[in-house]
Amino acid sequence: MIPNDRRYLETHEWAKQEGDVVVVGITDYAVKHLTDLVFVDLPDLGDQLSRGERFGEIESVKAVSDLNAPVSGEVVEVNEQLQDQLELIGESPYEKGWMIKVRMEEAELPAEMLDAEAYGKLIED
């Protein structure tokens, strides 16, 4: 089930807009392909992100993957629970497993981001 209330990158990050702040995480599809997660490296509060650029990485027993910023802006919150409870990403990737919150420079999420239907088609292949 891919939530309809957010937009997606082809690199499997999701973004949910809440006013001028965007909540960012990775999709269930990404979690399942990474399998056993062992580490996540997230930015610090106040860090400036640029859309499309790396903001951190997630590591599993089989791979290390970059995390890409869906928007440009300032990191205003980091999910500190993930340091001690990395399993939240796998158990609840769209809710409790969120990673960061970013105050966007743009007014809206970028138009090129995928909606749930388009993201679903992307991962079908």
Image (spheres, grey):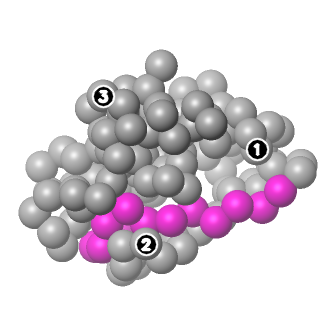
Q: CA distance from mark 2 to mark 1?
A: 21 Å
Residue type at mark 2 is Gly
Which class describes the residues within 10 Å of circle 2: few (<14), some (14-19), or many (20+)? some
Q: Which mark is residue 34?
A: 1
Query: Which numbered circle lies on residue 117?
Result: none
- The x and y percentages for residue 107 are 10, 63
Examine the residues drawn in magenta and state their main secondary structure: strand
Horizontal relation, residue 16 to residue 69: left or right:
left
On the image, the x and y values in percent for residue 18 come to: 19, 45
Which numbered disc flags the more N-terminal residue, 3 or 2?
3
Q: Residue at x 55, y 56 (%)?
A: 11
Q: Which residues are magenta?
A: 63-75
Q: Which residue is mark 3?
A: 4
Q: Position of residue 64 (x, y in %)?
A: 78, 61
What is the crowding at mark 1: few (fewer than 14 residues within 10 Å), some, or many (at least 20)? some
Q: Secondary structure at mark 3?
A: loop
Relative to 11, 103 lies left or right: left
